[in-house]
Amino acid sequence: MAVLKVTFTKTTRGKLALVLWVLNWISVLTGIILFSLGLFLKVEIQKRKELMSADVHSVPNMLIATGLVACVINFLGGKICYDCVDTTKFLRWKLLMLPYIVCTFLFTFCILVGALMCYSMRNELEESLFLGLRNAMLYYKDTGTPGRCYLKRTVDLLQIQFQCCGNAGFRDWFHVQWINNRWLDMTNSEVTDLVLSGPLLSSGPLWPLYPALVLSGPSTQHWSCLAPLPSHHRLRSNVEGKYLMDGVPFSCCNTFSPRPCIQTQVTNNSAHYNYDWKTEERNLWTRGCRQVLLDHYTNIMQSIGFIVLIIWLFELWVLTGVRYLQTAMENLLRQGDPDLESDGWLLENSIAQTARSNFKIIKNLGKCYQVDDDPNIDVPSTAQQEVSTCQIPVAR
């Protein structure tokens, strides 16, 4: 029994063909929209590729490819539907109609996959942003290194534009050296102290020893543990010789704060008048750039995913109409009279029967490559029979 059978007259067949012709041209426009959305997302990701550790262009590439295929398939579909108004013109498309519908179904499925990818990209993007921002902060100071000199400007513009600071928060800057050594006076004892020890939160534990640096030349460094830690404004002992301090770059300053920005000695309450760093965090941007960027891209991808889902439903509607037109025209050709009514359907048999018949076809195709099904495989040849009946004399 046919699934969702509909009877079409000559007039309704002609109207259906013309409507599908228009819808296919609209689908060409939706293909252009898909291509544009993929290109827009690709450009947005490309803008901040320095802040990402991995390639996350799978979704935009999928949308771009799907959009191009949509333009080609729907352009061809518009030509086919327009010729279906005349029965004689339909004959040249008769053999191509079923392969065209199968290809359109696969293409429609790809649109659905693209929409779902827009909603499932968040975890991959979050990991890429975490590693990318971490590396960008580590190389922030390398303004004189080829290939990294642009990262300081990139990170500063990011923090100003998106009103964020650090990877997960402004405290991330306490754990990296973000000032280049050429801007440090290594003859200054205060600078050397920070290079040797690093900053320590006032609420953190005190370290019993700190590493001291003996400068024997402009590029020679030697470490040794000498004396107890002299200051309680240190974050941790640092044996790598990095200039760590409880400070942040200028781009972390909150422009809406009424107080002048405090970007150095952030955790030292005694260094600033009427200041408590635990309650004055609004002086700096408190949100991490990873979360801000993740929300930014998530909003974009959710909007794109919603548009792609609408396009998928529209393409599914067009595909359904083309299937009705194909079956109605084929049944009309069997009757031989173009003025008669004809039936159209989505499936000629029930879903279960269609699945069984397709499975049987696939199974039969597999048997074509099996040698064991040869009826003569077990029949011995006459030559073999003659050889077996002959007795070969044996010398005694």
Image (spheres, grey):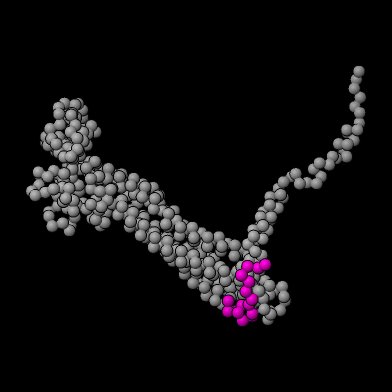
Residue at x 55% of width, y 72% of height = 78
**37 inside magenta stretch:** no
**10 inside magenta stretch:** yes
Of residue 376 and residue 44, the one placed in the foreground of this image is 376
Q: Total of numbered circles in the picture?
A: 0
Residue at far top of view: 396
Residue at x 15% of width, y 47% of height = 277
Residue at x 72% of width, y 46% of height = 370
Where does residue 200 sit, x and y in percent of width and height? Answer: 18, 38
Q: Quadrant of the C terminus?
A: top right
Q: Can residue 89 be seen here? A: no
Residue at far left of view: 273
Q: Residue 329 sits in which quadrant?
A: bottom right
Apparent side of residue 80 relative to residue 146 in the rendered image (left or right): right
Residue at x 86% of width, y 36% of height = 384
Of residue 327 and residue 345, the one placed in the foreground of this image is 345
- Magenta residue span: 1-16
Where does residue 233 sit, x and y in percent of width and height? Answer: 15, 38
Q: Quadrant of the N terminus?
A: bottom right
Of residue 283 and residue 196, the one placed in the foreground of this image is 283
In the image, residue 272 above or below residue 15: above
Q: Can residue 48 be seen here? A: yes
Where does residue 205 sit, x and y in percent of width and height? Answer: 19, 35
